[in-house]
Image: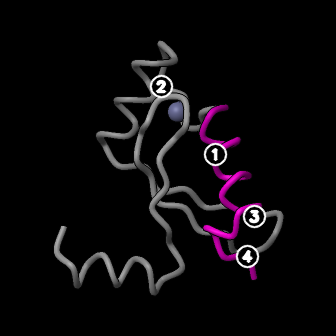
Amino acid sequence: MTRTERQHYLEGGLAELACDSCAALVRVRKSSPQQTSVQWTTAAVRQCATELGALVPTCPGLRASIEHAVRTGRLDVP
Ligand SMILES: [Zn+2]
């Protein structure tokens, strides 16, 4: 990914976040305190799927990682 693309993602409110349990790298955006959008890359889906043994679009570890990122201010919440 080029620097310009990365900045574009960040400007769009997306933050890169790695899952604490499977290390899958996803892009996360909080549109409200209750709403979280997660963008899965193909690699991240494969990595999480390997860990969970099934294609599950939400990983419990990732959910915890997102909550942690919100608490520590790594994710902006409007
Ligand atoms: Zn995970």
Amino acid carrying mark 1 in the image: Ser
Image coords of residue 73 (percent x, y): 69, 70
Secondary structure at badge 3 equals loop
Amino acid carrying mark 3 in the image: Gln
Which mark is on residue 65? Answer: 1
**CB atoms of marks 2 and 4 within 8 Å:** no
Mark 2 or mark 3, which has the lower sequence index?
3
Q: CA distance from mark 3 to mark 4?
A: 9 Å
58 is within the stretch colored magenta: no
Hey, which quadrant is residue 45 in on the image? top left
Q: CA distance from mark 1 to mark 4?
A: 15 Å
* Left or right placement of residue 1 versus residue 6 in this view: left
Hey, which quadrant is residue 6 in on the image? bottom left
Image coords of residue 10 (percent x, y): 44, 79
Q: CA distance from mark 2 to mark 3?
A: 22 Å
Q: Which residues are magenta?
A: 60-78
The residue sitting at 61% across, 61% down in the picture is 37
Image coords of residue 64 (percent x, y): 70, 41
* Residue at the outermost left position: 2
Mark 1 or mark 2, which has the lower sequence index?
2
* Left or right placement of residue 66 versus residue 55 in this view: right
Secondary structure at badge 2 equals loop
Q: CA distance from mark 2 to mark 4?
A: 28 Å
Q: Main secondary structure of the magenta part?
A: helix
Which mark is on residue 28? Answer: none
Which mark is on residue 55? Answer: 2
In this rendering, the label closer to the viewer, 2 or 4: 4
Mark 1 CB near ligand 1 (8 Å cut)? yes
